[in-house]
Image (cartoon, rainbow, N blue to C red):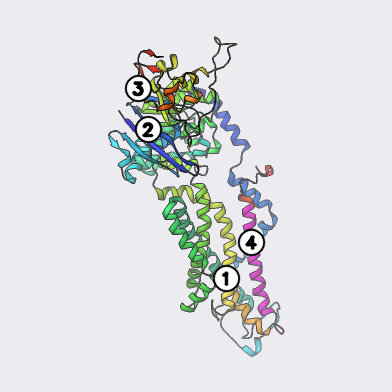
Amino acid sequence: MVPGAEDGRSMISETGAKRIGARSPWEVSVRRFRANRLALWSLYVIAILVLAALLAPLLAPYDPIAIGDVMATRFQSPSWAHPFGTDEFGRDLFSRALYGARVSLSVGILAMLLATSIGSLYGAVSGYFGGIVDGVMMRIVDVWIAFPAFYLMLLLVGVFEATVPVLILILALTAWPVTARFIRGEILSLRERDYVQAARAMGLPAYRIILRHLIPGALSPVLVTGALAVAGMIGAEAGLSFLGLGISPPTPSWGNMVAAGKDTLANAWWISFFPGALLTLTLIAFSLVADGLRDALDPKALDQKFV
Amino acid sequence: MILSVTDLRTRFEVDEGELWPVNGVSFAIAAGETLGLVGESGSGKSMVALSILDLVPSPGHVVSGEVAFEGLDLRSLSGSAKRTIRGGGIGMVFQDPSVSLNPVYRVGDQVSDVVRLHRGLGKAEAWHETVHLLGDLGIQEPEKRARAYPFELSGGMRQRAQIAVAVAGRPRLLIADEPTTALDSTVQAEICDLLKYVQGEFGMSILLISHDLAMVTDVADRMMVMYAGRIVEIGHWTAISREPRHPYTKGLIGAIPHLGGGAGRPLGSIPGTVPDLVDLPAGCSFHPRCGEAAEDCQAAVPMLEDVGDRLCACYRVRRGGRVG
């Protein structure tokens, strides 16, 4: 008989009592997030945009690229037939905006995932090992960050043809050092945690400690910065495409759609307006979700209402 | 001897200078033995444990000395060989299980991680072992508790779970660093009993670190007393607790409250405070607080010497009795 086992009844009631009252940190965070109206609605907006982008071939009433009878269909203002109007080539802007969402959202989200993965791993390795390794790795990051990101992007899109995968790579390449530096700071404090010390005392190799104990510990700040980064990436892609350095027409992206309407703004406002409005809506939605995540995941904001 | 530590020295370099939390520590633990290590906070007890495992946090590092575990010189091993010893040869229990278990993983996963790592079992086998081990360590409904997160368990349960993590790799030596300090007193007694049980069941040696003399005398076979980075007295627990010889040990034992007999007698205390490790007094580190100190105490550090039934590092203590 194990000592203490005969005392099992009191232990069960003790743990049992804990279970009834307490919600897991995850549940508390979900509740807190759901109570934040703005963040919740922003999440719905993002969900609708993502769904629309995914279902673009089904939802789009017209071909986004093919040009038909230009003279008959060009510069039509918004109507039931063309909710966003038509452009100078008579293409349906609603259909183009749907396909543009595919480009903008996939570039934004995939570039963020890539940048965050590289940055997290790099920052975690740097922070965990510390010392000379950390010094060298962080100086590389410093140099990288010191190089103005937008000029780096301009340089790279000048050299490589700006297809969607290339844009994703370029955006991720310019963004990862920021994530790396940020994660490294988180890891520096996490690695002093007792459970990390305990994991080392149990003989876990460094890669297991980094992947299993350090990066998951830094997950909530990563989520917050990730959501913000998506907004940054979409904005950057739109900026490049607006300047004609990103996705080039006829493939629609919100950025080049805004650019397409800029000369006819006085006569056909809708050409720039709708993609511009979608961009604004998307950026605001991601920022608000990031805000909501930050509040919801903050363990220090112990709002008893949700615990 | 399963573990023998010889003249171990660990140094920290800080802005104020350098300090030696482990300053020439030597001891040995036999197979199946429990050795207690007692001393005040800041005496370097935990650093002894971390130095053995070579896990001293920056800016500290082990400077010299030898740590032989089952005849292997741990300090000369490669990184991967050290990791095999950590958890597989030497397990460690930490003070506060609410921070030394990772809050985001289920308890069972943290145990089975170690089972898989050190015993090479597959996922399903390791989980089965984990549930079995948790049950063996007195956790009721182990299948259910294995799926619980640390915050869902009570303090005592968490400490049992942490002990499960520590012994999951079937180590031959368990280092328990203040395993009951964060627990309330009824649970403390349970954990003490559990340590004795684990030792008998798994045939392990234990290095039990505590500032709680009563607990150490309850669990340990032999005990050693540490002061300012040095061992000042080491011997069988009955000898030391019945008749402490080193003035510091006397002070410690005099400070234990007794039920009954000593009612009305004021509780003993040691004057002064633990010295600043950066600026240790010359000679015996304890002399400014010692009622028996003389001139020679300030001249040189007394070495551990055989004084009959124990080793003691004090100029006032000589073999067979007191001189002067």
Range drawn in magenta: A265-294
Majority secondary structure of the magenta segment? helix
Secondary structure of residue under mark 1 = helix
C-alpha span from label 3 to label 1? 74 Å
Subunit that carries the residue with mark 4: A
**Pointers 3 and 1 in contact (CB under 8 A)?**
no
Q: On the rendered image, what quadrant is the N terminus of chain A found in?
A: top left
Q: Earlier in the sequence, mark 2 or mark 3?
A: 2
Same chain shared by disc 1 and disc 2: no
Residue on which disc 2 sits: B24
Q: Which quadrant of the view contains residue B155? A: top right
Q: Is residue A285 magenta?
A: yes
The three-letter code of the residue at mark 2 reads: Gly
Secondary structure of residue under mark 2 = strand
Residue on which disc 4 sits: A287
Residue on which disc 3 sits: B305
Residue on which disc 1 sits: A236
Does residue B121 appear in the picture of this structure? Answer: no
Position of residue A102 relative to residue A42, above or below, is below
